[in-house]
Image (cartoon, rainbow, N blue to C red):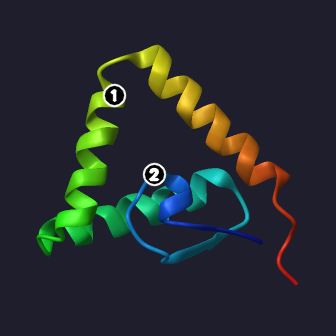
Amino acid sequence: MKTMTCKQLGGACDMQFHANTFEELAEQSKKHGMAMFQAGNADHIEAMKKMQELMKSPDALSKWYENKRKEFEALPTNK
């Protein structure tokens, strides 16, 4: 299992996500982001706006995703 924070994934806080795969981690991050959006958290909403801009370019989004996946893969496994 590996750990990344909301901030490491482009978010706004230090909430930690733990998963065996990057896909699992991304899903946790997505759920957290939606909860923060529904709660009206301004910092997370601003981070989401940045992600929405990234989504306008499929190439940029793919590159971002692949870089985050590589960052995840390079992390040490939690003990």
Residue 9 place in picture, x, y as percent: 52, 54
- Seen from the viewer's position, the closer of residues 28 and 45 is 45
Instruction: Give the number of the mark in front: 1 or 2.
Output: 2
**Height in image: 49 above or below 36?**
above
- Seen from the viewer's position, the closer of residues 47 and 78 is 47
Three-letter amino acid code at the position of disc 1: Met
Q: Where on the picture, by quarter, is residue 12?
A: bottom left
In screen coordinates, is 61 left or right of 20? Answer: left
Residue 20 place in picture, x, y as percent: 73, 65
Residue 72 place in picture, x, y as percent: 72, 53
Q: Where on the picture, by quarter, is residue 77?
A: bottom right
In screen coordinates, is 39 left or right of 28? Answer: left
In screen coordinates, is 66 left or right of 50? Answer: right
Determine the residue positioned at 68% across, 43% down. Answer: 69
Residue projecting furthest to the bottom: 79
Q: Which residue is mark 1?
A: 55
Of mark 1 and mark 2, the one earlier in the sequence is 2
Three-letter amino acid code at the position of disc 2: Gly
Determine the residue positioned at 87% across, 66% down. Answer: 76
Q: Which residue is mark 2?
A: 10
Q: Residues within 10 Å of mark 2 (few under 14, many from 20)?
A: some
Residue 56 place in picture, x, y as percent: 29, 21
Q: What distance separates the C-alpha of mark 1 from that of mark 2?
A: 13 Å
Secondary element under disc 2, as helix, strand or loop, is: loop
**Height in image: 5 above or below 58?**
below
Which quadrant would the N terminus be assigned to in this image? bottom right
Determine the residue positioned at 88% across, 84% down. Answer: 79
Secondary element under disc 1, as helix, strand or loop, is: helix
Determine the residue positioned at 24% across, 70% down. Answer: 36
